[in-house]
Image: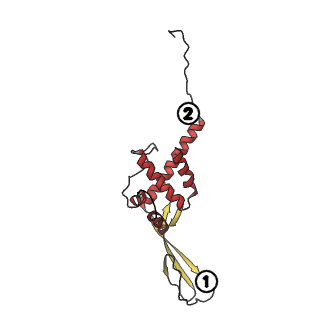
Amino acid sequence: MTNGTKRSRVIRVAGPGPAIREFLEQQREARAYAEAWYQALRDWDTFRSEEMLTSIGPSRPSRMRVIVGNWRSGSDGGSDIVSTLMQHTPMGAIPASKVALSIKDERGDGLLPRVQAGRGPESLLRETGAWVHPTDRARAYGEAVLELAVKLGDAKAAIHLRRIRAG
């Protein structure tokens, strides 16, 4: 050294510390989970689920009938077939009507109806796993879809939502 003072250098051999790597990985996983929910709502991939309900004994006539989904009346044996429109989501198949009602009941800036109508961005993430630009808007979409997932009962979404808000 030319001026007689000692200088120290920090050499990072292994990159950032383990705590930082873990935090960054959790953030990446949370963004990926938000993207999965976003694409599920954007694509609106549905299918019909049919179940046969049977009752013991003969059918009893009644003035009131509980209706869930689309019912086709069965024979005199007391069985009915329930047909429900289901939607594929990251937490599994759930009734599409439940998702649609939750979107309709959303309070806020109306991001979820835009997603359902296919008017939002193509994706929330870049190839690297970071938010697309503008990042604040992509993050808002990510939080909105995870809030909906939490409302629908997705426990993993609650964890990822906390992580996104912490980042």
Image position of 50 with respect to 133: above or below: below
Residue farthest to the front? 108
Of badges 2 and 1, nearer the viewer stands 2
In depth, the one of 70 and 103 nearer the eye is 103
The image shows residue 137 at horizontal and vertical percentages of 41, 49
User: CB under 8 Å between callouts 2 and 1?
Assistant: no
Q: Position of residue 108 (x, y in %)?
A: 44, 57
Asked if one can make out residue 79 in the rendered structure from this viewpoint, the answer is yes
* Way the structure is coloured: secondary structure
- The residue most toward the left is 119
Q: Earlier in the sequence, mark 2 or mark 1?
A: 2
> Which residue carries the number 2 mark?
16
Q: Which residue is rendered at x = 63% and y = 85% of the image?
A: 56
Q: Mark 1 highlights which residue? A: 55
- Residue 10 or residue 79, whichever sits in front: 10
The residue type indicated by label 1 comes to Ser
- Front in this rendered view, residue 59 or 6: 6
For the point 60% across and 36% down, which residue is it? Answer: 18
Quadrant hosting residue 60: bottom right
Which x, y percent locates residue 44? 43, 62
Q: Residue at x 54, y 16 (%)?
A: 7
Q: Give the percent coordinates (x, y) of residue 138.
A: 42, 49
- Disc 2/disc 1 C-alpha distance (Å): 63 Å
| Dot 2 amino acid type | Pro
